[in-house]
Amino acid sequence: MDRKQLLIAFTLLFAVSISAFAQSKKSAKPLDDTQLKTQLDNLAESIEPKVIAWRRDFHEFPELSNREFRTAKVIAEHLESLKLDEVRKGVGKTGVVGVLKGGLPGPVVALRADMDGLPITEKADLPFASKAKAEYNGHEVGVMHACGHDSHVAILMGVAEVLSQKRQQLRGTVVFIFQPAEEGPPAGERGGAELMVAEGVLDNPKAEVIFGLHINSMTPAGVIRYRAGGMMASADQLYIKVNGKGVHASRPWGGNDPITAAAYIIAGLQTVVSRMSPITDSPVVVSIGSIEGGNRGNIIPDFVEMRGTIRTLDPEVREEVHENIRKVATNIAESQGTTAEVVITKATPTTFNNPELTRKMLPTLEAVAGEENVKVTLPITGAEDFAEYQLKIPGLFFFLGGMDKNMSPEQAPEHHTAGFRLDESGFTLGVKAFCHLVVDYSGGK
């Protein structure tokens, strides 16, 4: 065989090899979803010690809202070590975003965890208890993960590690959102989910749905709680200034007493809930938490300032409650010869689980936790800024049990308290739940 014939033969052999390789790739089938989820579960169980270790590290070194510098650094380094397609830092102040592109076509699914601690001095007897200090509102305070955000971060880091190991079998793209300042940014700053959304966290790549979870210290480990529709309340800020006419307290008829008017207004505001709101359909809370006026017992001041919170679970009810508060406060003030300035600032919207998405994904939660361990929760009048994402795209938010199964809810320490603590045995269920939600949603189930 001469040189020319040898070249022709080699070329034909190379072409046949390429064709066979392409055919084998074309005919290769990905794992079915059952196999894939089994493998993801095994990976989740294998990294449980790492998830717990991450959580304990974050718990020992908590940081306040918009100051989560160390936390963000640990997260970013972990995501970079997984060789994600993209890792973005400094989103919404200190947030971190990771993007994982699967090997198969499919939708973009976002997963979210919040990172910030609270200005609380820890009293729990734990070997990894926080001793951190920071400045808050001009005062030195203790800092503590008293709401479980440390566990949220650790769980989502675990999800990123598990899914990244099966990226070629995944459909679509997963966006991991590590969000600062869920508890609210410092005075004069923007932050939290609102800022993350404003900076395009759901737009590049464009997410189709978002899932989030919150650990709950009063729900047994291994249990998931959810609710379609309004699950957690909107939280709006209420400010009322009652303007009167100051006078010596020995002759109150000579002025217009804003303190008496304020007292009547506080009592009257309770009728906004008990007499003007459909509380059997949608819970409402109106609370005054601060009242300031005057500086001596024998002087009636010119004005009194009050601050409070408004909680509702329905957008229409929310507007009605706001209007009724204005009417009650201004009319009562007028009846006392004073005037009332009412300022209502909309803060956190209602955490509203898209009913169709909830219906679609409920079988996933039941499969991963066991049908008997997935329960409908009553509406919660606490607030969560996960709601900001749900204003943009459909979202599902659920509670993950973090209470020792041998305890009762009455014995369990509440969130936002110095004795807050969690049963870490429920964390792996959180990792599995997120992984299953990604697989099932992306598979069109």
Image: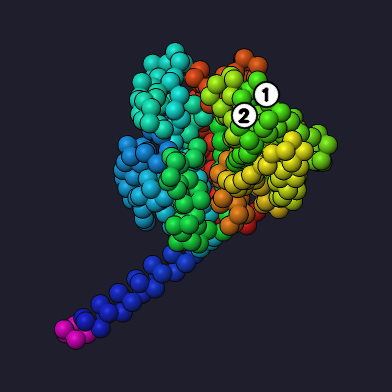
Quadrant position of residue 274: top right
User: Against 233, is 205 above or below?
Assistant: below
In the displayed structure image, the side of residue 231 where residue 432 appears, left or right? left
Q: How many marks?
A: 2
Residue 102 appears in the rendering: no
Mark 1 residue type: Arg
In the displayed structure image, the side of residue 290 where residue 318 appears, left or right? right
Tell me the distance, in whole angstroms, between the alpha carbons under discs 1 and 2. Answer: 7 Å
Res. 251 mark: 1
**Label 2 neighbourhood size at 10 Å, few (<14), some (14-19), many (20+)?**
some
In the displayed structure image, the side of residue 398 where residue 58 appears, left or right? left
Res. 247 mark: 2
User: Against 218, is 156 above or below?
Assistant: below
Q: Quadrant of the C terminus?
A: bottom right
Q: In terms of depth relative to the viewer, which is nearer, 368 or 90?
A: 90
The majority secondary structure of the magenta stretch comes to: helix
Q: In terms of depth relative to the viewer, which is nearer, 64 or 247?
A: 247
User: Against 88, is 3 above or below?
Assistant: below
Instruction: Look at the image and name its color scheme.
Output: rainbow
Q: Residue 77 location in percent, x, y?
A: 31, 43
* Callout 2: SS: strand
Q: Residue 214 location in percent, x, y?
A: 56, 36
* Callout 1: SS: loop
* Residue range of the region highlighted in magenta in the rendering: 1-5
Q: Residue at x 67, y 32 (%)?
A: 255
Q: Residue at x 44, y 28 (%)?
A: 119
Residue 95 appears in the rendering: yes
Judge whether residue 158 is colored magenta: no
Mark 2 residue type: Val
**Label 1 neighbourhood size at 10 Å, few (<14), some (14-19), many (20+)?**
few
Q: Residue 297 location in percent, x, y?
A: 58, 19
